[in-house]
Image (cartoon, helix red, strand yellow):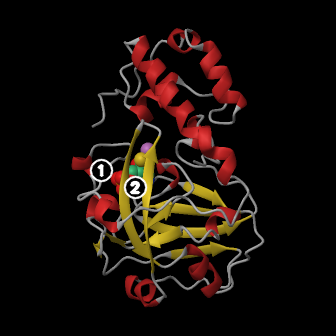
Amino acid sequence: MRSPFRPGVVPDAAILDDHRSLVRSLERRGLIRGGLSLGALVMLTGCDVKRPEAVESALLAISRLNDGVQALLFDPDKLAPTYPASMILRPPKFNAYYDVTKVKPVDGASWRLELSGRIADKRPWTVSQLNALPQTSMVIKHICVEGWSYIGGWTGPQLRTFLEHVGADLRARYVAFKTADQYPSSIDMATALHPQTLLATQYGGDTLAAPFGYPARLRTATKLGYKNPKWITAIEVTNTYPGGFWEEKGFSWFAGI
Ligand SMILES: Nc1nc2c(c(=O)[nH]1)N[C@H]1C(S)=C(S)[C@@H](COP(=O)(O)O)O[C@H]1N2
Ligand SMILES: [Mo]
């Protein structure tokens, strides 16, 4: 799926200049920040830098994605659309900042979810403890800034339930995640407490397959794909802005849909 991107080969930034007004509009709307490098755009969207039309369509895809953003932002009670189970795509579409053949499966038996920050009970969690929490299922659309989407069915405890269980400070600002593949990510507390934000352990009624985040990944219906870290190994509740993998490269932190 990913077109070849050789780190170290910095594409000609002049190609971004060719789309200055579109870039400015994305910046104004908070979708990208001034520092967005063409390299990061290429890496995340997989577009071919040598073709200015491809750069333009990648920027347009990001632009279109945000059109519904204001409706969901800051409204903790607003639900994202859900779909019938018959629409669940099997298997789901894979994406990561590397190819699917490079996925390193996580061993669920030895896996521990580490907890830190503003959490009363920081004892690490096992898979069976997660499975013992009340479970929620949702069928939602996954939207990637690459310009593709699919309907997926996810099951697991609501992140809210988990956070309540461990005595997290629910008035803190951020929930941050570490992952087995070094893909740091973080969300605002309102999103963490949203009913459509799960610590997902199942897809389509089956245990998550290795490429999709086994044993646990975030699935939130109100954020773009890149705000859904897979293979979570640690959760921190904090008031210090934690950032994230793509966010450090110039993409929007809020990334609502
Ligand atoms: N740990 C980890 N999580 C990740 C990523 C990644 O590279 N590593 N990529 C993100 C992006 S950009 C997308 S679109 C989704 C893809 O999730 P899927 O493979 O379940 O469709 O995972 C997100 N979570
Ligand atoms: Mo993505």
Name above or below for residue 204 compared with residue 223: below
At 30% from the left edge and 35% from the top edge, which residue is drawn? Answer: 2
Choose top left, top right, bottom left or bottom right for residue 238: bottom right
Question: The residue under label 1 is which amino acid type?
Answer: Lys
- In the rendered image, residue 160, in percent from the top left (x then y), is placed at 61, 76
Which is more toward the observer, 20 or 104? 20
Question: The residue under label 2 is which amino acid type?
Answer: Asp
- In the rendered image, residue 3, in percent from the top left (x then y), is placed at 30, 29
Mark 1 secondary-structure assignment: loop
Q: Which residue is the site of mark 1?
A: 93
Horizontally, residue 182 falls left or right of residue 120, namely left
Horizontally, residue 78 falls left or right of residue 131, namely right
Q: Which residue is the site of mark 2?
A: 181
Disc 2 CB within 8 Å of nearest ligand 1 atom: yes
Q: Is residue 162 at least partly visible in the picture?
A: yes
Which image quadrant: the N terminus?
A: top left
- In the rendered image, residue 249, in percent from the top left (x then y), is placed at 56, 35
Disc 1 CB within 8 Å of nearest ligand 1 atom: yes
